Image: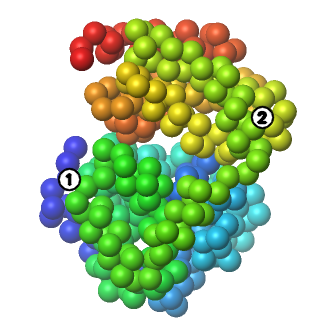
Amino acid sequence: MKPSLSSVEDALSEIRSLIEKHHSFVLLEHQKPDGDCVGSGLALVQALRNLGKQALLVSQDPHPAVYDFLPGREFHTRAQYIEPEDFRAEVAIFIDCTDPERAGKGLELASNSIWVNIDHHVSNTGFGDVSLVVPDAAATGEIIYKLLLAMGVPITKEIATCLFVAIATDTGGFRYQNTTQETFEIAGALTGYGAIPWEIAEHIFETRSVSSILLLGKALNTLKLSRGGKLATVSVTRDMMAQAGASPDETEGIIGYPRSISGVEVSLLFREMEDGSGFHVSFRSRSKVDVSKIAMRLGGGGHPRAAGALVKGNLEEASQKVLSVLDEFDIWMDS
Ligand SMILES: [Mn+2]
């Protein structure tokens, strides 16, 4: 899976020349965008604007409110507000998307464009006219940083702030296993360009809404330990969200709590889908289990330590399905 250095260099220079040659760009985020997607997108859209290009960042779903402090939001809109026939971009850049369908409704805006795929998911399908997929990168933000360097565009304080957020969120505040020397080198360079780490941490890790704390309390009440204490499960239903007055993106971060329990290797969060047809299941593992394989078996995907899938049915049916796949992998014996 590891791309050779030259294939990364080749893709970077191909993207650089595409950007030089063309004028209009649409940047597509994945559904339910996370901090990496939002930060990477806002950084790149500002860089393109600074080059005098016509560029728009588009997502199907809204940006989580926690990222409202980021600069560049005036260049972002939601796919539902744009008529594809009114908007033609020569180049569509998919950001942090494992496959084109991840862009959801945004995909309609890319039908006649050249496709560029910039991502770090191991499960990326390699789609697009140009594909820049670097599974070793902790965040898509790291790849965007390298692209901006390759393009020779100035990294402003605004761009640096967005990229720092991308990297800080996908590494869980520089704590997850994907954090490398290079991650710190890039974060250090971004600090030099004007990103202020403590201010960013205050916004993204130390500020929560009352509703998300109330929802966390309800979710923790559902905690179940099984498989000899190695598996921890919590769930969030639509009822719980309504009672807490929370929105679906406020489940973000809940799964970190079961994962942190001593002895737990895998944690699961079952979040009921808005239409009630099933559950979005998030997987986290501490150090040994590759949960992306489990998620892929269920039709989802992700990273070895963090993955997700959609599973139909009520809570009992969904958890039965997930548990039987987990047990197939025989992950509870080795340690
Ligand atoms: Mn990412």
Would residue 103 be seen by someone viewing this image from the given angle?
A: no
User: What residue is shown with label 2?
Assistant: 241
Examine the rendered structure and indicate whether residue 42 appears above or below residue 241.
below
* Tag 1: amino acid: Pro
Q: Residue at x 62, y 10 (%)?
A: 317
Q: How far apart are labels 1 and 2 at the CA level?
A: 42 Å
Q: Quadrant of the C terminus?
A: top left
Task: Specify whether residue 9 is in view.
Answer: yes
Please tell me whether residue 91 is drawn above or below residue 278 in the rendered image.
Answer: below
Q: Quadrant of residue 148?
A: bottom left
* Residue drawn at x 37%, y 36% as measured from the top left: 305
Q: Which mark is residue 323?
A: none
Of 124 and 213, nearer the camera is 213
Mark 1 and mark 2 residues within 8 Å of each other at the beta carbon: no
Q: Locate residue 166 relative to residue 178 in the image: left or right.
A: right
Q: Secondary structure at mark 1?
A: loop
Q: Which residue is mark 1?
A: 3
Q: Position of residue 161 (x, y in %)?
A: 49, 74
Q: Residue 205 location, x and y as percent? A: 56, 55
| For residue 136, side relative to residue 64 (left or right) | left
The quarter holding residue 316 reads: top right
Position of 76 with respect to 244 (left or right) is left
Task: Indicate the amino acid at tag 2.
Answer: Met
Give the mark toward the camera: 1 or 2.
2
Residue at 64% across, 57% down: 207
Q: In the image, residue 7 lies at what x, y percent?
A: 19, 61
Q: Secondary structure at mark 2?
A: helix
